Image (cartoon, helix red, strand yellow):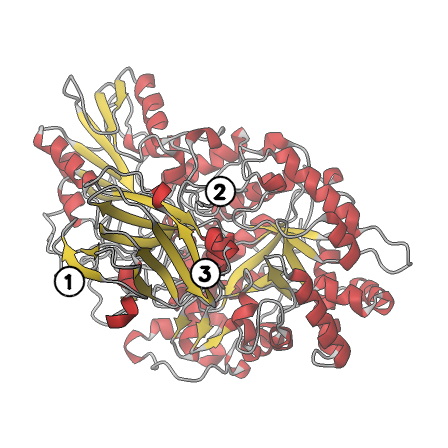
Amino acid sequence: MRARSNSVAGAALGLALAAIGTPVWAQTATAPAPTASAVAHPELWPQLHMKRRRDPKVEARIDAMLKRMSVEDKVGQLLQIDIASITPKDVETYKIGSILNGGNSAPNGDERAPAAEWLKLFDAFYDASMKRTDGRPQVPVIWGTDAVHGANNIIGATLFPHNIGLGAMRDPALIQKIGRATAEETAATGIDWSFAPTVAVVQDDRWGRTYESYSEDPAIVASYSGKMVEGLQGEVGRDFMGPGRVMSSIKHFLGDGGTGGRDQGDTRASEAVLRDVHAAGYVTGLEAGALIVMPSFSSWNGEKMTGNKSLLTGVLKDRLGFDGFTVSDWNAHGQVPGCTTEDCAAAINAGLDMFMYSGPKWKELYANTLAEAKDGRISAARLDDAVRRILRVKVIAGSFDRGRPSTRALAGQFNQLGSPEHRAIAREAVAKSLVLLKNNGGVLPLKPSANILVAGRGADNIAQQSGGWSISWQSTDMTNKDFPNGQSIWRGIDEAVRAGGGRAALSVDGSFQAKPDAAVVVFGETPYAEFMGDRPTLEYSPGDKADLVLLKKLKAAGIPVVAVFLSGRPMWVNPEMNAADAFVAAFLPGTEGRGVADVLIGDRAGKPRRDFAGKLSFSWPKRLDQYVLNKRDPNYDALFPIGYGLSYAAPQSVAKLDETRPAGVTIDQNALFVRGRLAQGPGWTTSGSIAQSRVDRRSQEDSVRLTWTGQGEGALAVMTPLDLRREANGELSLVVEYRAAAKPAGVSVAMEGGQTATVPVTSLMTAASGQWGEFAVPLRCFAASGANMEAITRPFVVSSARPLQLDISGVRITSAAVGGAPCPR
């Protein structure tokens, strides 16, 4: 497809829907109210005219294979298993169709494994899939990975800005270049499938995956989706699935951006809104030839997408004409009513073609699916349709003809990772994605001949500027050395200033001896991915105001202050913006710090080397509780509307902003105290005595004080039903912020789910008496002790049999630097 502007993309979407009237997102005031029905009506959806037509030779090849495949062979094709749970020998035995590396899965369990190890492992899996002595078809295994902003699992890869920043560029042609570069770096490892692009149209910015969305505006998403697919796969009729290309899967079908700010939530919307808003990226992505679609964890009007036949089959396959295959999200089929992760014929019958599974019990899934295929609970026709779709993609993608992964185009050419050409594309994307929100007094651009102080916790932190899905899933334990081809924002500024004859100094805490001419403070959200990124409000860092203090300190010293804000979503930063002369929304720019310096640092004459071009792809909130803020909504009242972005060519002053913070807003966004409730009355203790009161830490009575008398064991419990299977697999931890009045002894923490799983934690409580500290217990420790992580009823039970005064200010589930640490005993 040829490059299209945003307006043309929007027009194309409108034309596709012309037969059903004006798109809902253009009707605003007359949009129909959400319905209770979760049954789609395919006749209300557009019929797409795909460029890619079925090739009779391909279909004949598939027919011949299907005739020779056993039922066991066919069922094996329906499974995609995490490499942490499967061996090459298993692939040989069960004829598994696909493997994946989950967020924290890697060769030899080493998330920092060099690229050569990834290629070596894929060779082993491929060779296993091709071992046959019975004359039945040899079907190569394929490998899927979350290459969502570059080949981001691989050390040395170029990491591009996350989607929210790319949306600010308004540059579909550059998106296609990014897709191509991502494909080439992924292909260097042999891996042949990217779980990208995400085409969610996020409506509630509290969602932790907001940064995976290009925009709240469906037209912007539509303008990008097809171009990213073409970048990854090539263009139909030109270089489709040619050398160095990888398969693309658009996700998460459908409505994942409308779940009320909750991961795996429920999109309550009319079918018209689902179609006109949330399906925008699928129209252009499918037209561009996307080979794979990933149904969402989430629900639509109460029904899980993974089990919604009217959408997966009636709309996606029958009406939209999709002839590739669908793959579930991580164990998502287990959430379909009547299903478990090891048994879900209902999802296959609804139109799912491939299970994505992680965990040790995948052989149970295979056995149950095989039994259901043999006894007719999964019909022979549905089984053959699913396998046909998988084989069709493998034939079209060249999986049968390319040979071992190490023999394919670009495989082993590890100089593709972080190549100068790819880094140049990333640098351009960073520069174009920056949005100038404020530049009072013309502080920017900074003169390169000046003495510039660079401060803030994000200044020399490539992991923070790259965000989640950077080497690991949550990316909390990464350091600069994990990005050998990357450059921090500090390094980019230092390089530009030295080239201009000036001097830049790094001081994270903002201290200095000689007063600088200006200060650049880089700060913002620390890395997170789904689950951990969900928040109750859009207030930036409600429990830690150190960044605001730093900005105010520099401002009070009479230093011009430039704030560079790193975030995965628009946030309420009115106090921080008031404390800065200039404020730049950098979102999550990735590994090319030079791109920031290109725009902030001027030439020797003090003139811009490059102007700001970014325009907000999401509305910026005026209040911290404006988490649903979309231009088509009634009473739209943004601080900065979508499309806002200042420039050097068009300066504008920003008046002081209202810093009023509504009363009663929660502070700790991940606290189980907020999401759940404390057990009451006799349920607090199994025996003995315990008393509870409130104490202050960050604000009035924000913490609980527990006092054990020592008259037997007492316990406090947080009652919050949770499914923690994925978090446990993802090496997340239960983190407790505490203060003990005296050295504790005999303290334990438990999770209740099926049975009580208790872990002693006294050895972890190392904070000095009377001082706040925190300890972390890996969730796998509770799983190993017998907790049913799928059905946790009380995720936090703290107990002691001895006298103790313990204050607790936060209990949350998040990433913590415990890695493979042993469970405490």
Whether residue 632 is visible: no
Residue pictured at 41% horizontal, 58% vertical = 220
Among the two numbered marks 2 and 1 on one chain, the one whose residue lies closer to the N terminus:
1
Q: Amino acid at mark 3?
A: Leu
The furthest residue to the top? 501
The image quarter containing residue 71 is bottom right
Residue pictured at 16% horizontal, 59% vertical = 693
* SS of the residue under disc 3: loop
Q: Indicate whether 560 appears above or below 440.
A: above
Mark 2 against mark 1, which lies toward the viewer?
2
Q: Amino acid at mark 1?
A: Gly
- Mark 1: few/some/many CA within 10 Å (<14, 14-19, 20+): few
Q: Indicate whether 510 appears above or below 104.
A: above
Whether residue 85 is visible: yes
x and y percentages locating residue 468 in the rendered image: 42, 46
In the drawing, does residue 273 fall left or right of residue 577?
A: right
* SS of the residue under disc 1: loop
Q: Is label 2 in contact with label 1 (beta carbons under 8 Å)?
A: no
Provide the residue designation for mark 2. Answer: 822
Among the two numbered marks 3 and 2 on one chain, the one whose residue lies closer to the N terminus:
3
Q: Amino acid at mark 2?
A: Pro
Provide the residue designation for mark 3. Answer: 724
* SS of the residue under disc 2: loop
Provide the residue designation for mark 1. Answer: 664
